[in-house]
């Protein structure tokens, strides 16, 4: 059975989100609000087609892609930098490389038990998020 990330997921831990946001150049006032948030992710997966909607009381972000197909990402409402993104499978992990102005930018999703894990990377910063099913 291939891995299926579909579902509604609530953030339960968020390690070094501050460092990740600093690396992205997010201003102090925005960081202060952003780090209080408990975002929810709604993921719809149909084979290699993904819809990932991250929502919060402050901002939300929608990403749709197919694994193996590079796309333009605008990061609207986040750092607003454009990049070229490519998501691939590495075994059962979903790995995104975001090529652009920021070095070493990307993220990895995987399932562990019934939890959804997300590692967000930018430059020398790694943020680790864990989500539980709503
Ligand atoms: C998306 C936030 C910090 C700006 C607001 C914070 C709003 C809720 O890209 C992401 O996930 C991938 C993988 O699931 C799918 O797009 C992470 C949150 C990153 C970066 C920037 C702070 C302002 C948080 C949208």
Image (cartoon, rainbow, N blue to C red):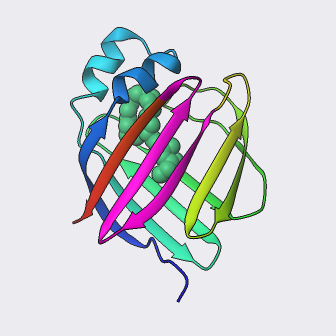
In the image, is residue 5 above or below residue 19? below
Left or right relative to 99: residue 13:
left
The residue at the point 61 percent across, 69 percent down is: 91
In the image, is residue 66 above or below residue 25? below
The residue at the point 41 percent across, 66 percent down is: 111
Q: Name the image quarter holding residue 85.
A: top right
Ligand 1: which quarter? top left
Residue 131 x %, y %:
29, 56
Q: Is residue 62 visible?
A: no
**Magenta span contains residue 38:** no
Q: Please, which residue is most extreme toward the bottom here?
A: 1
The residue at the point 45 percent across, 16 percent down is: 22
Choose between 105 and 31: the one closer to the eye: 105
Residue 9 x %, y %:
30, 61
Q: Name the image quarter holding residue 49.
A: bottom right
Residue 122 x %, y %:
56, 28
Q: Is residue 18 visible?
A: yes
Left or right relative to 126: residue 122:
right
> Please, what is the dominant secondary structure of the magenta stretch?
strand
**Magenta span contains residue 106:** yes
The C terminus lies in quadrant: bottom left
- How many marks the image carries: the answer is 0
Residue 24 x %, y %:
53, 21
Left or right relative to 89: residue 132:
left
The residue at the point 65 percent across, 31 percent down is: 104
In the image, is residue 118 above or below residue 127? below
In the image, is residue 80 above or below residue 12? above
Range of residues picked out in magenta: 105-125
């Amino acid at each position: 059975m291939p891995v299926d990330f579909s579902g509604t997921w609530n953030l339960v831990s968020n390690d070094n989100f501050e460092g990740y946001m600093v690396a992205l150049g997010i201003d102090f006032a925005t960081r202060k609000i952003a780090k209080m948030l408990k975002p929810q992710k709604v993921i719809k997966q149909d084979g290699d087609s993904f819809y990932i909607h991250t929502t919060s009381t402050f901002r939300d972000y929608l990403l749709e892609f197919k694994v193996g197909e590079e796309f333009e990402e605008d990061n609207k409402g986040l750092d607003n930098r454009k990049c070229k993104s490519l998501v691939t499978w590495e075994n059962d992990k979903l790995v995104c490389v975001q090529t652009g102005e920021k070095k070493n930018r990307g993220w990895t999703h995987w399932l562990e038990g019934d939890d959804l894990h997300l590692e967000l990377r930018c430059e020398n910063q790694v943020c680790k998020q864990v989500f539980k099913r709503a």
